[in-house]
Image (spheres, rainbow, N blue to C red):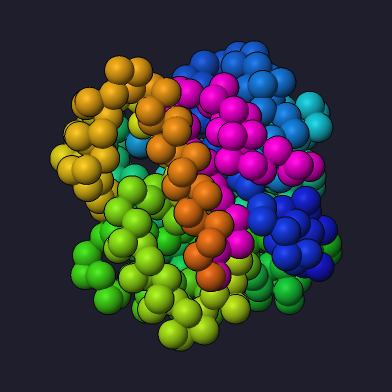
Amino acid sequence: MRSGSNLEQALESGRFAVTAEIGPPRSASAERIRTHARQMKGCADAFNLTDNQTAMSRMSSIACAVVLLQDGLEPVVQMTCRDRNRIALQGDVLGASALGVRNILCLSGDHQTFGSMKEAKNVYDLDSIQLLMVLRRMRDEGKLWSGDELEVAPKLFLGAAANPFADPFEYRVIRLAKKIKAGADFIQTQSIYDMQRFERWMSLVREKGLHQKVHILAGVMPLKSHKTALYMKNKVSGMCVPDSIIDRLRRASDPKEEGIQMCVEQIQHLRDIEGIRGVHIMAPAWEEKVPEIVRRAGLSSIS
């Protein structure tokens, strides 16, 4: 075991794992995080904390992780390369590890033009693949990227993201292979709505044997309405939402209930795809629905 985290233990045991996302507040109060912790405790093996998602300033993912640890939940700290150089990233990981964080998800980060401070300067001293290499060296060799020895190496379970819906399609599996080679222990995918394209991607993943080298958690996100689906299709880069899903939500008498049911059906379908080792549930500003989704999908026995 590299880190001994709940998530690592669940995946290594072969159990279908669940992670869920919690969006840090745009606030100096931790009460919202504690509320989500109370609502979601016991419904997932670990909980992702986003890092200034959509390029907007929020409470730091590491600070939110400490709140979750205090309340008995295991965090997955997301770290983006957008806002910090290699000095700050390595320092933050050492601090997070000292505070009890074991799962780190390495991301490039949304471009600053998505957020409310478009004049902000991106850093990108490292990209997400390089960050995986740096953190793996810290864990496995006990060294900073400079070669300096660490007195105590961090215990880390390293994750990365994959988007099967961005173009060019064929490059998506090549990029996944690079992340695995760089050190990814687990992968969380972009939200899946186009199941046919996702299954084609998984077929290529299996052809290269990548599903045997890394734990893949399939991303799902419940939709509240057909307008939300249209926004995801037309405004969110790298997202693919078929018209059949938009039409189903438009015709529904209760669109929110239909969105939850669709998410449950997606999880049940994903469980039958060879190489899928778990599911990652993203419900921004709808976190309180995650326990219901987990229960209705038949995953209620989780931790």
Q: Quadrant of residue 56?
A: top left
Tell me which residue sits at (60%, 55%) in the image. 278
Whether residue 280 appears in magenta in the rendering, the answer is: yes
Residue 267 in the image: x percent, y percent?
A: 51, 48
Q: Quadrant of residue 8?
A: bottom right
| Quadrant for the N terminus in the image | bottom right
Q: Is residue 209 left or right of residue 153?
A: left
Residue 248 in the image, given as x and y percentages of width and height: 26, 34
Q: Residue at x 38, y 66 (%)?
A: 199
Q: Answer left or right for 156 relative to 211.
A: right
Choose between 40 and 156: the one closer to the eye.
40
Question: Furthest-bottom residue in view?
Answer: 208
Magenta-tinted stretch: 275-303
Total marks drawn? 0
Along the line of sight, which residue is nearer the eye, 148 or 158? Answer: 158
Vertical comparison of 104 with 25: above or below? below
Residue 105, given in percent of the width and then of the height, sits at: 56, 54
Is residue 25 in view from this perspective? yes
Q: Nearer the viewer, residue 239 or 252?
A: 252
| Residue sitting at x 51%, y 30% | 23
Up-down relation of residue 260 to residue 130 (above or below):
above
298 lies above or below 258: below
Would you say 148 lies left or right of 19 here? Answer: right
Quadrant of the image containing the C terminus: top right
Q: Is residue 82 visible?
A: no
Image height of 259 relative to 106, above or below: above
162 drawn magenta = no
